[in-house]
């Protein structure tokens, strides 16, 4: 009898333990499934965000070629498309076109007949990111009756956030650049001709601080009362690889212009 009772007790304990284990397992399974669902939701969210990010990157603006051509004048210039802000897009493209063609206006407005102008201008994009576009224009102009062709160099810098073109004084510290140009120790030049580099450096050193400051402040196209103005001192700048390159006019005998590389 005692043995039978003991067996019954053991069976009862075993059944009770089994029930407890089942309950514990069921509760844990619910918890695990809940965690899995939460993880799945998080992963789906992250994946969705990743897709949006990649989608945004793929929708970056493009730069396309446009050409102005008349008689012996040909000016290649850029326009942007697929930019999210349509109002800024129109403003930027107007500035790009007007500033690219402004070099021709200099000669026409000074009384030169367009039929006497032989000009070709091309461009290179030096910086293209989500904040700035920086473009260099290079070319040659030969006016009927002149002894030799003259090299053309000018730049256009676009601030995408502002939706307009900007000058050196808008994106750089002018006083810092002035100090570096006067010292020239840490300033490189684009010319590969060592003799020409020395002559151009001497020309810069001969410019007074006040005059050089005035040249830098005036650098690049700028707007006044909504009208684009050409830099009166003839200096231009552009951005490339975390550097600022500044072009300062020189006499024809020493290259027409000199380009100085300033580390940001």
Image (spheres, helix red, strand yellow):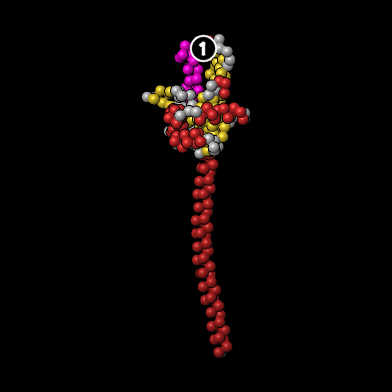
Q: Quadrant of residue 198?
A: top right
Task: From the top left corner, tell me how far across and down residue 112 is, in percent.
Answer: 49, 11
Residue 191 among those drawn in magenta? no
Task: From the top left corner, tell me how far across and down residue 144 is, in percent.
Answer: 55, 10
Mark 1 lies on residue:
114
**Looking at the image, which residue is at 56% across and 25% down?**
123
Task: From the top left corner, tell me how far across and down residue 245 is, in percent.
Answer: 53, 32
**Looking at the image, which residue is at 51% across and 73% down?**
20
In terms of depth relative to the viewer, which is nearer, 38 or 147? Answer: 147
Quadrant, the N terminus:
bottom right
Seen in the picture, residue 2 relative to 170 is either above or below; the reply is below
For numbered disc 1, what is the local secondary structure? helix
**Looking at the image, which residue is at 46% across and 24% down?**
233
Task: From the top left corner, tell me how far across and down residue 10 is, in percent.
Answer: 56, 82
**Looking at the image, which residue is at 46% across and 14% down?**
110
Seen in the picture, residue 34 relative to 51 is either above or below; the reply is below
- The range drawn in magenta is 95-112
Disc tally is 1
In terms of depth relative to the viewer, which is nearer, 12 or 109? Answer: 109
């Amino acid at each position: 009898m005692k043995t039978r009772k003991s067996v019954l007790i053991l069976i009862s304990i075993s059944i009770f333990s089994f029930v407890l284990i089942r309950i514990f397992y069921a509760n844990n399974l619910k918890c695990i499934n809940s965690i899995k669902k939460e993880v799945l939701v998080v992963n789906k969210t992250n994946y969705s965000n990743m897709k949006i990010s990649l989608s945004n990157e793929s929708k970056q603006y493009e730069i396309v070629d446009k050409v102005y051509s008349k008689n012996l004048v040909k000016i290649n210039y850029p326009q942007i498309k697929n930019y999210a802000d349509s109002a800024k897009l129109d403003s930027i493209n107007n500035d790009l076109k007007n500033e690219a063609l402004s070099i021709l206006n200099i000669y026409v407005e000074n009384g030169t007949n367009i039929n006497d102008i032989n000009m070709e201008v091309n461009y290179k994009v030096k910086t293209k990111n989500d904040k700035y576009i920086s473009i260099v224009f290079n070319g040659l102009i030969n006016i009927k009756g002149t002894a030799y062709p003259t090299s053309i160099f000018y730049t256009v810098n676009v601030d995408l956030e502002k939706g307009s073109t900007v000058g050196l004084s808008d994106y750089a510290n002018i006083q810092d650049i002035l100090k570096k140009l006067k010292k020239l120790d840490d300033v490189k030049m684009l010319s590969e001709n060592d003799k020409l580099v020395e002559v151009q450096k001497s020309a810069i050193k001969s410019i007074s601080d006040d005059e050089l400051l005035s040249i830098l402040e005036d650098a690049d196209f700028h707007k006044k009362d909504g009208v684009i103005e050409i830099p009166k001192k003839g200096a231009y700048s552009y951005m490339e690889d975390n550097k600022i390159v500044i072009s300062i006019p020189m006499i024809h005998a020493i290259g027409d212009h000199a380009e100085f590389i300033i580390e940001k």
